[in-house]
Image: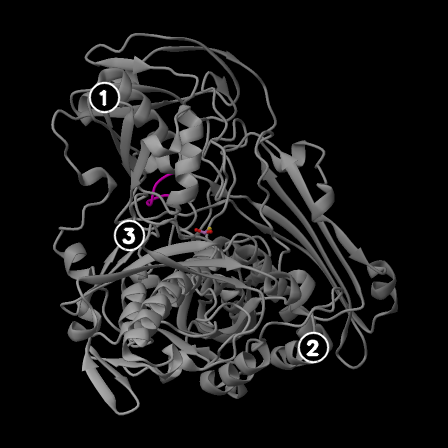
Amino acid sequence: MTLTRHLRVDGPNHDDRLDLMAQGVLGQPLNRLEGPLKVTGRATYAAEARPRNMAYGVLVQATVPAGKVLEIGDAPGALAVIQDKRMVRYAAQGMDEKGPTSGPDRIEYMGQSIALVVAESFEAARHAAQNIAVRYKSEDVPVLPDAVAPELPPKKQSAVGDVDKAMRDAAVTLDQVWHTPSQMSAAMEPHAAIAEWDGDQVTIRAALQMLSSNRKQMADALGIKEKNLRLLAPYVGGGFGSKLGINAEAVAAAIAAKQLGRPVMVAMTRQQVFDLAHRRSETRQRIRLALDGDGRLTGIGHDVLVSNLPSSEFTEPVAQATPFTYQAAQRQVVHAVARIHRGCAGSVRAPGEAVGVTVFECAMDELAEAAGIDPVELRLRNIPDVEPTTERPFSSHMLAEALQEGARLFGWSGRKSVGQRVEGEWMIGMGMAAAVRVNMLIESRARVTLLQDGHAIVETDMTDIGTGTYTILGQLAAEMLGLPAERVEVRLGDTDFPPASGSGGSFGAASSGNSVYLACEEIRSQIATVMGCNEADLTLQDGVARAGNVSRPLSELITGQVTADGHLQPGKTEKSHRQATWGSHWAEVAVNRWTGEVRVRRMMGVFACGRVLNEKTARSQCLGGMSFGIGIALTEAMEHDPRDGHAVSRDLAEYHVPTHADVPALEVHFLPERDAYVGPLQAKGLGELGICGAGAAVLNAIHNACGVRVRDLPATPDKIIAGLGG
Ligand code: MOS
């Protein structure tokens, strides 16, 4: 019988046992366990399996912004044209339990999928899909955020005191409006799925981030039982939110495979990903700040307008971190939603803070300048002791340390005043910003098996979307069981394994890691029983168990194998403490006087995220986040046609993510931290922290270089030149 070790995180965990484990592998910058498979092409991604007799499906997309499909014509050369009311209009939101909105004959945005064409080859299917005649009843609908009266969802508004009064009484004020455009996750691997039925059982290989909720969504969408559905996603080429929920391609593949009685693959083209994956909503953000004569904030106002489709509940939580980042007696958050017909908005890496903290930290820079206070000092003066309004304690709080350490490491004291550093035609400036992101823990299960021959196996339906999950879970089991890391095999991305948190919201590593920790703790207890000691007194190292002066190889202690499950649930500490991760961003840029070109010369981040599980994969997460920050500041904008709302920039030639040439050697520092309120690992989320505020450091550096404030992101050369008066 497999024993399960449960833990609900209802209180703190201050012990340092993980630091005292003997193997010494946890935290080490190990290379990715699956790295060789990926670089040699042996890791099979969703679209790379080739079951016998597979047919190819291509999604047909609406060419009107709203209305109804009246008739779809024939597709010469195709095996089938499939219209099925179960096919979906847009992707499920992350962690949804139900399938996404279906009924593809009803059109909500231009580019929505309305049917599937299946053929013997991808090329034939694409040709047929492009030439198919569709008759519509089309409707005129609003596609611009300003064209409609915004909704004010009641739960998303908050106010304490009177910000208007704080503004009137303040020594220094700031009141400005920023705009950020729609953004796209732009993961390297386009969405794809291969579905194959065996009787009433369907197996779907797909590019997905959260298999246990994806399975619920898919079963609901298809109208089948969860037990008849297996999802496989062993390798995923990036997600950034776009694969949190099931999308049109996987649902269509399953329907088509059933109808044709053969395996069907549906892979999106890059352009289809831009149309069909969730975009991050564009935002309009008005920030009001009131400062007293001592440089302390007395009022904070954050008024946000975002957009989404009329039928989607998600709204970008832009001001999510505003209530607890800085202290102020008078505060107000207004969160409005414009219901318009652009592609569905949903979670894109660091939903909320990615654009909310970025804009807020630009506002803090403007306020510091207006008040004549150093930007670092302004932030230090306004850090709250407890969460404002709720007065909950922070689980841990390292913003001050991140600011001070960052200033020292970056050489902040060498910063000149605006426009004072010039090298030929380049104007040089430095900027900084705080980093903050909420922390979450999600229920997770894992199974660990220790074999007599000194190997271990970790199994969970957790995904590795390029983040390093395989490696950190292997390291954890190796540390707990006293094995070299290469003796642990990690199996992920299969709904036959115990359900985990999935990858999202930066919670994957800590949530699934804690479940592996618990399973290993159960195995350690069983070994301790055989050794006749307490689990806490057991040392496991290199396949040998020690207790006091007794030492025995694991192979003598185990017969066959020992298997245990770990089950982690979030508990009271979710409510009792404000959990967040903290950091600081630093940038040095050069702005060309004549062309308005901005080059990021140096960029550095200092982060505190609790225990770091692998220094290399953790650092890589931050490199990615900071690169996103450069994109938000300088290049990324998903444009919509103002007439019909369709995505105009819908490939990587038109949607400009930063390339290698745009990103200098980035510097990442971690502050040593153990957070006692987030489970025995004492580790928090890191995946998204690196993006939160990163763009603000770049934008603030632009101002320091040349005196130009760009509040309509991204800061492209035309806007810089306009600001320079050119
Ligand atoms: Mo994330 S936007 O929860 O993958």
In this rendering, is residue 709 above or below 78? below
Q: Is residue 620 left or right of residue 158?
A: left
The span from disc 1 to disc 2 (Cα, nearest Å) is: 61 Å
In this rendering, is residue 676 above or below 627? below
Dots 3, 2 in contact, CB < 8 A = no
Residue where numbered disc 1 is placed = 125
Residue 383 numbered mark, or none: none
Q: Which residues are magenta?
A: 650-654
Q: Nearer the viewer, residue 672 or 317?
A: 672
Q: Is residue 211 left or right of residue 723?
A: left
Res. 665 in view:
no
In this rendering, is residue 301 above or below 606? above
Residue where numbered disc 2 is placed = 385
Mark 3 or mark 2, which has the lower sequence index?
Answer: 2
Q: Amino acid at mark 2?
A: Asp
SS for tag 1? helix
Q: How many marks?
A: 3
SS for tag 2? loop
Residue where numbered disc 3 is placed = 492
Expressed as whole percent of the image width and height from the top left, the position of residue 112 reads 44, 26
Q: Is residue 712 left or right of residue 518?
A: right
Q: Residues within 10 Å of mark 2 (few under 14, many from 20)?
A: some
Q: Nearer the viewer, mark 3 or mark 2?
A: 3
SS for tag 3? loop
The span from disc 3 to disc 1 (Cα, nearest Å) is: 32 Å
The span from disc 3 to disc 2 (Cα, nearest Å) is: 41 Å
Expressed as whole percent of the image width and height from the top left, the position of residue 540 reads 27, 79
Q: Nearer the viewer, mark 1 or mark 2?
A: 2
Q: Residues within 10 Å of mark 3 (few under 14, many from 20)?
A: many
Cβ at disc 3 under 8 Å from ligand 1: no
